[in-house]
Image (tube, rainbow, N blue to C red):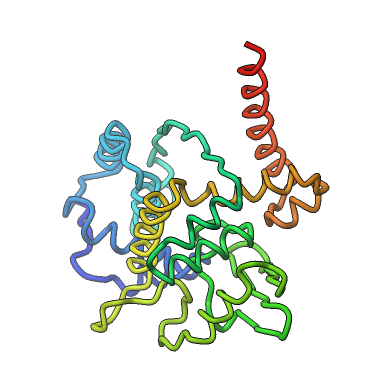
Amino acid sequence: MAWVLPKKKDIEFSEFLRRKGLRYTTVEIYERVLLSLLPQELEDVKEANKKLQDLALRRNGALLIYFYAIKNWFEYYKGKSIAKQLKKPNINFKKREPIYKPIEEVYNLINQMPDEKYRTAAKVQLFGGLRVSEVLSIKKKNITIHEDTITIVIEKAKRDPFVVFINNQTPIYHDVRTYVENYTHYFPYLFSHPINPRGYRMTTLIETNRKYYSKMLKEYVGIRTHDLKRILAETLKQKKVPIYTIKTLLHHKRIDTTMRYFDEINQREAATELTKIL
């Protein structure tokens, strides 16, 4: 008998995912995959493995989302023993070289971005040492404005919340304060509020904002989203800030992660020196 994918939202399956501790946005992504992104039926685990392998050959960026969505579906309806037969596909994406620019230049280019929402998000990400997912998930309720400081609580799944401080000596303080104080939209996320008044799907909306945010950064600043974090790391290193302080400012859990950033910076500096010698 064919394993039939759902033609409508399965409430019990959704509850199963939430009981496993998955975030609401992750549950929505899995539901969307199962409802629309896959064929309407798969005969068995063998056919599911073949489908995943085809996606791997086409270097589909959402491959792991497909994998975990199908695996959880098998686990719920067929049991863990069947789900374990699903093979996690191996795909190696070409590593993109980071782009470095002086932080002053980047800040000036960000100011040329026409959309205030994305312009403010880029400034917070640059000076806050945040990932794109962290900055786009900032909620207004988690921001507190003091006379000389703005505190932003960043909530992450499977990790303790951490705080970003923006004091009034930081060049972005007044821009961020103005944006937050003028934000009157009902949507909880500060940089991902919907334009469409007919409603929204949280997951789709945040991903759409991420796409346009990334596109605007590339167009106006000439960098990718994670380059903002690397640029901050390089600036702090040039200022001879202690490495453990940099680890804290970049919100890394392990010092090894910070050292990887330093390795990239050192390799680039070494290549520059070699060019001078030759």
| Quarter of the image where one finds residue 4 | bottom left
Numbered-mark total: 0
- Comparing 70 with 32, the one in front is 32
> Taking the image as drawn, is residue 273 in sight?
yes
- Going 60% across and 69% down the picture, which residue do you hit? 172
Residue 87: image x %, image y %?
39, 37
Q: Position of residue 78 (x, y in %)?
A: 35, 54
Q: Which residue is at a point 59% across and 65% down the rendered structure image?
A: 156
Task: Tell me the residue at 47%/76% (across/down).
Answer: 189
Quadrant of the rendering where the C terminus is positioned: top right
**Percent from the top left, x then y, of residue 82?**
38, 47
Does 229 sit left or right of 192 as displayed? Answer: right
Q: Nearer the viewer, residue 71 or 75?
A: 71
Examine the rendering and report whether any part of residue 1 can be seen. Answer: no
Q: Is residue 53 left or right of residue 250?
A: left
Is residue 190 left or right of 236 when viewed as pictured? left
Left or right, 258 with reference to 64? right
Q: Residue at x 48, y 55 (%)?
A: 109
Above or below, 181 relative to 33: below
Dividing the picture into quarters, in which one does residue 45 lie? top left
Q: From this view, report whether residue 110 is shown above or below residue 87.
A: below
In the rendered image, residue 98, in percent from the top left (x then y), is placed at 52, 38
Classify 186 as above or below 62: below
